[in-house]
Each structure stands twice: as C-alpha cells, then as structure tokens.
Image (cartoon, helix red, strand yellow):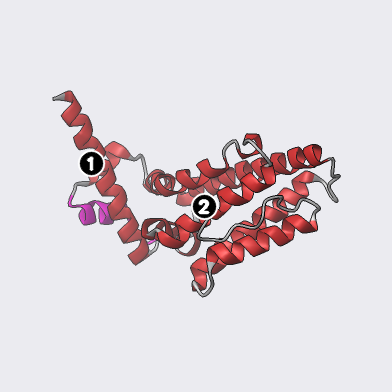
Amino acid sequence: MARRTKQDAQATREALLDAAERVFEQRGVSRTSLAHIAEAAGLTRGAVYWHFKDKADLFNAMMERVTLPLESELAGVYQAPGDPIDALVMRLLHSFGQIATDARTQRVLNIAVMLVEHVEDLWPVRERHAQMDRANVERMRLVFERASALRQQPLPADAQVLAEGFHALVRGLVYSWLLQRSFDLQGTSRVAMEAYLAGIGLPRQWPPASPSAA
C-alpha cells in the first residue's frame, strides 16, 4: 500500500508539472497563480502546496524535469575519454537535437526564455538560471584548459573569458532558434561552434559530424 501511495504522489506531482507547462505557456508566468495550475490539473491548491512551497519552486521543478537531461550532457565532459573538445561538441549537438525534436523541451525552454518575468516572487527562478549558467561555463573552462594542456596549444586568452564567450554563443543559438525556428539548429550550431573553437586554436580533431549522426 505504501508503494501505491508513493506512486500516487508522484503521479500527482507530474500532473501538476504538466498543468504548469500548459498554463504558463497560455498566460505567461507572472499572470499565472497556483490556483490556475491546480484548476488546470483538476486538483486542489492544497495538493499544489503539498508538493511545492511556492510558484518559483514549482517553476524550477518544471525546468529541472527537462533541463537536467541537458545539463547531464555537460557534467564531467572535461573528463570524458578522448579529446575533450570533440566530447564537448558532440554532447552539445546531442542537446541541440533534443531541443529541435522534443516538444516538451521546446515548450519549457520557450516559457523560460520568452514568458518568464524576473519579478520579486520569481527571484529564485533567476538564481536557478544563474547557477546553471555558472556551472556550464565552469565545465567549458575546464574543457578548454584540458584541451590546451593535452595539445600543448596555448590559449589566446584566459580560459574563463573564452568559456564565457562560447557559452554565450550556445545560449544565443538556442534563443534565436526558439524566437524564429527559421534555421537548422543542429547544423548551424555545429558550424558556429567549430568556427569559434578553430578561432581560439582548439579545432575539432575528428572529422565534422553531420547533424543526423550527432
């Protein structure tokens, strides 16, 4: 019975997150209340507060459900076997592929990028984004430093600065694609990333992979 209760609680949580995606997309984040989400899920506000302490907590849980798989692509990338630059590019191309083809990922990223206002009650959402960005920049910095050491190729600038620039390139590609969806996200990203990496003296060592192969 306890196992069934735990399963029911998880199902309720997932239903609330599903409803949050729909309502945030329809109304925008600041104009959505927990009551709106509860109603859309066919549940009570008490059910919402059982699982989430406030709207920011619910929003971050919604984000983590789809962004954690993306974040996991970069976790430990600098320690991956083989060349760290190739590993970085291939993992990012895999993430771009998920963004380009998975409807839920697109919906949640669109909410996060286009429909969230960083007002006071959503400040934890902004901090969550900032933490994720800092972690990803740090992973990229470690990749650049390791690749530089392995190849005995000095970097043209501080690794932190180069990582910030590369991260901005990646974020900008996703933002631009979500805004218009007028270009091939994987193909364009591959060209842009490889051009940046070649420009800082760390070109990919494998033959460029086609987007479909990535």
Q: Earlier in the sequence, mark 2 or mark 1?
A: 1
Q: Residue at x 62, y 60 (%)?
A: 190
Query: Mark 1 highlights which residue?
Result: 11
Residue 37 magenta-drawn?
yes
Query: Mark 2 highlights which residue?
Result: 94
Q: Secondary structure at mark 2?
A: helix
Q: Position of residue 98 (x, y in %)?
A: 45, 55
Given the image, on which type of amino acid does mark 1 rest? Ala
Q: Is residue 13 visible?
A: yes
Q: Residue at x 60, y 47 (%)?
A: 133
Q: Secondary structure at mark 1?
A: helix
Residue 171 magenta-drawn?
no
Mark 2 surroundings: few (<14), some (14-19) or many (≥20) residues within 10 A? some
Q: For the residues marked 2 and 1, what is the alpha-carbon distance in whole angstroms?
A: 29 Å
Q: Residue at x 46, y 44 (%)?
A: 69
Residue 151 falls in image quadrant: top right
Q: Which residues are magenta?
A: 30-42
Main secondary structure of the magenta stretch: helix
Name the mark nearer the viewer: 2 or 1.
2
Q: Tag on residue 43? A: none
Q: Position of residue 95 (x, y in %)?
A: 51, 52
- Closest to the observer, 144 or 4: 144
Image position of 135 with respect to 101: above or below? above
